[in-house]
Structures are given as structure tokens and as C-alpha cells.
Image (spheres, helix red, strand yellow):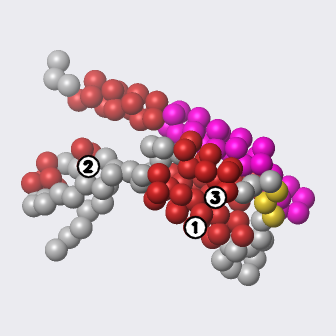
Amino acid sequence: MMVYASNQPSQFDEAVLDRIDEMVEFDLPGEHERRKMIAMYIEKYLLNPPGRWAKKVTTVDIGDEEIERVVKETEGFSGRAISKLAIAWQAAAYGTDGAILDQLTFFKTVENHKKGMVEKESWMKHAMERAKMLTQDR
């Protein structure tokens, strides 16, 4: 048995697709799942990062209400996107004296992450259109 995982299965070539007997689709995380993931990644990357060289991040004015706002704002995010967001929070904090993540930076990082995702989507759309144009029979 082989298991393939992709968020873009249309990019598999015909030979691969022909060998797939069953497909299972997983939806993007819902609100409950996003809440759990955000809490888990805050714990993992900010409050208790793994490794002896990683610094703990001090959060300032970030509580349940702020986390709930981020849960709402991350609708449509994949699990990977949520993980990358938490790493971006960590990087933002590490860029300060004392590894501090304040509320403004917390929300600004979400906003920047969402803008980056929109830009990547635009690039992907352009790349797909270009690939289609280059492979069409004329």
C-alpha cells in the first residue's frame, strides 16, 4: 500500500493518478480544530519551545480573547499555514530584546501572513495559467 498526500492532487501525472484506487479528502480545519492547533503551536513554539537553544517567548496582553480573534481570522487556513503562523510569531518575538510578543505584533503578524498567502495564491494562479498556455496545442 502507498499513501500519497497532496493539497494539489491535480498536479499528479496520469500514470500516478491511474494507480490511485481510493481517495480520501480532508477538509481544512474548522473553528474547533483551529483553536486547538493555535493553542498547541503557541505552547510548542512560544511558551515551551523544544531544544536547549530555543528561547521562551514572553507574551504581553495576549489572552483568550486575542486567541479567539485569531481563530476567527484564520478561517480557510490549512494546518501547515497555522504552524507557519506560529513560527512567524516566534520569529517576530526573537527579533526583539527579550523575545517578547505583544498584542500589536501578534495581530500584525496574522495580517502579514494572510497577505503573504494571498500573494502566493496569485503567483500560483499565474504559474498555472502560464503552464496551460505553454502546453496548449496551437
Residue type, label 1? Met
Q: Which residues are magenta?
A: 94-120
Against 73, residue 29 (above or below) is below
Spatial distance from mark 1 to mark 3, Cα to Cα?
12 Å
For disc 3, the marked residue is 87
Give yes or no for residue 109 being in the magenta stretch: yes
**Residue 28 appears at what percent x and percent y?**
38, 51
Identify the mark nearer the N-term, 1 or 3.
1
Numbered circle sitting on residue 98: none
Residue type, label 2? Pro
Identify the mark nearer the N-term, 3 or 2.
2
Q: Residue furthest front?
A: 65
Q: Residue at 78% x, 44% y: name it.
A: 104
**Residue 37 appears at what percent x and percent y?**
52, 62
Q: Residue at 78% x, 71% y: name it.
A: 55
Residue type, label 3? Ile
**Residue 84 appears at what percent x and percent y?**
57, 55
For disc 2, the marked residue is 9
Q: Categorize mark 3 by other alpha carbons within 10 Å: few (<14), some (14-19), many (20+).
A: some
Against 65, residue 122 (above or below) is above
Q: Categorize mark 2 by other alpha carbons within 10 Å: few (<14), some (14-19), many (20+).
A: few
**Secondary structure, magenta segment, majority class:** helix
Determine the image quadrant of residue 115: top right
For disc 1, the marked residue is 40
Numbered disc 1: secondary structure: helix
Against 58, residue 31 (above or below) is above
Spatial distance from mark 3 to mark 2, Cα to Cα?
27 Å
Determine the image quadrant of residue 101: bottom right
